[in-house]
């Protein structure tokens, strides 16, 4: 590997997360890795890029999305998840949708990059996002999804394993396992997925406690979800566990190691206590949460208990953009008392932690990969750089991954 000389990236404010914001700051990069962060004066190198009146932040981490659903933007009903899912299933069954979904993955990846995402955790049902995401500069974890009543593979863990084993990962792109949800994989499949992920040290993600109907189905085998699954012929072969939801999940080993639990919308105090004793991360998708009209998310109770909470956009089939910056701005408006530093951490470092990548990304610090985003300051906005970014509508000017910069919006 050839070594190139250092490049310095300067901005009016650098927000490293580790440490206070730096006015007239700079980040020095050698071979895609950060070598220094501090005031611009002492960091001088022959190659310098000055972004001027901007804030330079760690790149955003989107910890939950389904780019294959990009093509269903504005096509599905807002409101109840259990109206939305059958509508999605009907749309996906139409002829020609597979090619449209593939095209949507490409468009979605471009949109995510433009929005300042540098690391993306994407779930795809047939692991087909992998070759497409490898063509993009995004750092990504591609989660191969197991959904045992899907119309297409992978329906069994062997089919999924075959796809995952054929995947050649590298420093920027890795693979993970996604048993879809407690109601859509069998108890055996869930246990096998968890054991497989832990054995091979693969990231693991799952939709958990998304609605009260999910709990009702798992715990009592009744209700709207039961009716839906029974109508699809699913419950005959796979009867509901009829066990408390968190007991059922705990028995699979899910809480015995790191896992990204998407949503966790319907959760009790005792269950939050259980999560706080685990290495699990909760992915909160604020605007998708609003789209489905769920009761207020308990992310602040989670943070107060020391649970790692990060952010995801979910897909364009239930959200207006694939932008973590838009999620943070939404939360800043909804919860003006929420500390802005915590909010930025949820969109960066906490996502990196959830993906077990915090040693490499998520903050700006020497030794980490040079993944950052540059957002123009609003000239009339707050003097506090983070507040300025959160209260403006400015889109990122540039994004860097491994120190390679991409201009994403004209200034
Ligand atoms: Zn999802």
Image (tube, rainbow, N blue to C red):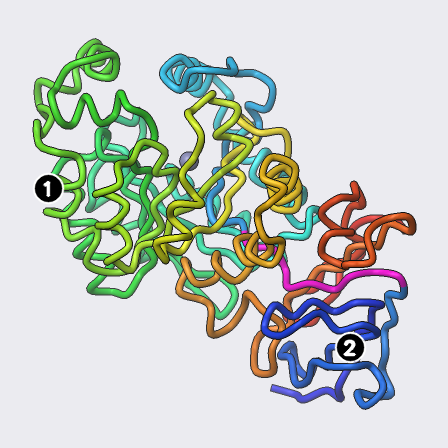
Residue appearing at x 31%, y 60% in the figure? 202
Residue appearing at x 78%, y 55% in the figure? 375
**48 relative position to 35: left or right:** right
Q: Check if residue 60 falls in the magenta segment.
A: yes
Residue 184: % across, % down: 24, 30
- Give SS at disc 2: strand
What is the crowding at mark 2: few (fewer than 14 residues within 10 Å), some, or many (at least 20)? many
Residue appearing at x 43%, y 35% in the figure? 297
**394 relative position to 15: left or right:** right
Extreme-front residue of the structure? 337
What secondary structure prevails in the magenta region?
Answer: strand
Tell me if residue 340 can be seen: yes
Residue closest to the eye, 306 or 144: 306
Residue closest to the eye, 306 or 90: 306
* Residue extent of the magenta highlight: 53-61
Q: Looking at the picture, does residue 120 appear above or below residue 220?
A: below
Residue appearing at x 58%, y 69% in the figure? 363
Tell me if residue 134 can be seen: no
Q: Is mark 2 within 8 Å of ligand 1?
A: no
Dots 1 and 2: beta carbons under 8 Å? no
**207 relative position to 394: left or right:** left
Residue designated by label 2: 26
Residue closest to the eye, 284 or 108: 284
Q: Which mark is residue 44?
A: none
- Of tags 1 and 2, the one toward the viewer is 2
Quarter-of-image position of residue 322: top right
Q: Check if residue 134 falls in the magenta segment.
A: no
Q: Is mark 1 within 8 Å of ligand 1?
A: no
Residue 181: % across, % down: 27, 35
Residue designated by label 1: 188
């Amino acid at each position: 590997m050839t070594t190139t000389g250092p490049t310095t990236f300067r901005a009016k404010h650098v927000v490293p997360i580790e440490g206070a914001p730096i006015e007239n700051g700079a980040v020095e990069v050698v071979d895609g890795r950060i070598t220094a962060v501090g005031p611009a004066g002492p960091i001088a190198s022959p190659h310098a890029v000055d972004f001027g009146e901007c804030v330079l932040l760690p790149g955003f981490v989107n910890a939950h999305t389904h780019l294959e659903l990009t093509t269903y933007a504005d096509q599905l009903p807002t409101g109840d998840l259990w109206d939305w899912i059958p509508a999605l299933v009907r749309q996906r069954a139409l002829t020609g949708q597979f090619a449209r979904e593939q095209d949507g993955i490409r468009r979605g990846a471009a949109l995510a990059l433009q929005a300042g995402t540098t690391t993306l955790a994407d779930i795809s049902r047939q692991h087909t996002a992998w070759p497409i995401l490898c063509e993009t500069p995004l750092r990504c974890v591609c989660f191969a999804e197991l959904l045992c009543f899907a119309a297409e593979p992978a329906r069994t863990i062997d089919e999924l394993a075959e796809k995952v084993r054929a995947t050649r990962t590298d420093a920027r792109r890795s693979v993970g396992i996604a048993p879809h949800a407690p109601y859509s994989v069998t108890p055996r499949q869930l246990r096998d997925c968890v054991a497989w992920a832990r054995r091979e040290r693969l990231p693991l993600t799952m939709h958990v406690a998304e609605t009260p109907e999910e709990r009702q189905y798992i715990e009592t085998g009744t209700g709207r979800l039961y009716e839906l699954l029974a109508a699809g012929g699913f419950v005959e072969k796979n009867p509901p566990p009829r066990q408390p939801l968190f007991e059922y999940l705990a028995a699979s080993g899910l809480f015995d190691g790191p896992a990204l639990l998407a949503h966790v919308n319907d959760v009790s105090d005792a269950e939050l206590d259980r999560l706080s004793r685990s290495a699990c991360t909760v992915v909160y998708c604020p605007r998708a949460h609003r789209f489905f009209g769920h009761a207020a998310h308990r992310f602040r109770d989670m943070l107060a208990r020391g649970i790692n909470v990060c952010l995801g956009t979910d897909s364009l089939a239930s959200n207006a953009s694939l932008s973590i910056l838009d999620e943070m701005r939404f939360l800043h408006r909804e919860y003006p008392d929420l500390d802005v530093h915590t909010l930025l951490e949820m969109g960066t470092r906490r996502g990196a932690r959830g993906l077990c990548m915090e040693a490499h990304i998520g903050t700006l610090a020497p030794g980490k990969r040079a993944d950052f985003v540059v957002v123009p300051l609003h000239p009339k906005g707050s003097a506090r750089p983070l507040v300025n970014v959160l209260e403006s509508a400015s889109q990122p000017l540039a994004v860097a991954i491994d120190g390679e910069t991409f201009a994403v919006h004209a200034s």
